[in-house]
Image (spheres, rainbow, N blue to C red):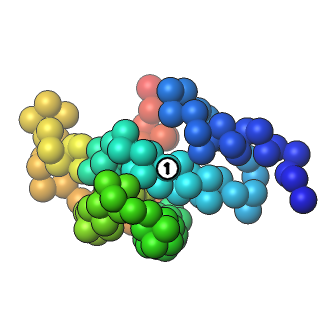
Amino acid sequence: MTLPDAAARDRIQRDFEATLVVEAAAGTGKTTELVGRIIALLRSGRTTLDRILAVTFTDKAAGEMKLRLRTGLERAREKATGAEHDRLTDALRLLEVAQISTIHSFCADVLREWPVEAQIDPLFELAAGEAADALFALAFDSWFQR
């Protein structure tokens, strides 16, 4: 069965010259296609895993993406030979330090790396859950009042 968006999915996997925005409902295969694109890039030798950033909205999604990437890399490596096999093996070695995280974690990493430029305390902590909601409400109210 061919999916109606097969051409768009194929482009995600093969068009490395384009910057793509993939917008679709939950459960339609965005993560699958992103993982496939990452593997295709690594397999081709166009980049290495330490030069890739994948950002999601939740810790759960980031963990799932990393797990799917590991599985995909292992499967691709089983079929690969020569330099391609070596590239995929290298990617598996780098997987634990791969930049696959939430937008919040990524931004926190950037701020920790450049605290002086951001004019913030380098020992800041991310607020979680209800504390984050309360801080957001306070900041929004303050902004709105101004």
Q: Is residue 143 above or below residue 111?
A: above
Q: Residue at x 73, y 62 (%)?
A: 27
Q: Position of residue 50 (x, y in %)?
A: 27, 51
Residue lying at the far front of the rendered structure:
82
The residue lying toward the viewer, choosing from 133 and 8, is 8
Q: Residue at x 14, y 38 (%)?
A: 114
Q: Position of residue 31 (x, y in %)?
A: 60, 58
Q: Secondary structure at mark 1?
A: helix
Q: Is residue 91 visible?
A: no
The residue lying toward the viewer, choosing from 133 and 73, is 73
Question: Is 5 left or right of 131, judged from the image as shown?
Answer: right
Amino acid at circle 1: Ala
Q: Residue at x 42, y 52 (%)?
A: 43
Q: Position of residue 80 (x, y in %)?
A: 44, 63
Question: Is 104 left or right of 1, judged from the image as shown?
Answer: left
Q: Quadrant of the C terminus?
A: top left
Quarter location, residue 81: bottom left
Q: Position of residue 55 (x, y in %)?
A: 45, 50
Q: Residue at x 90, y 59 (%)?
A: 1
Q: Is residue 110 above or below residue 125?
A: above
Q: Is residue 24 visible?
A: yes
Q: Is residue 62 above or below residue 138?
A: below
Q: Residues within 10 Å of mark 1 (few under 14, many from 20)?
A: many
Quarter location, residue 18: top right
Q: Total label count? A: 1
List the residue tagged with mark 1: 40
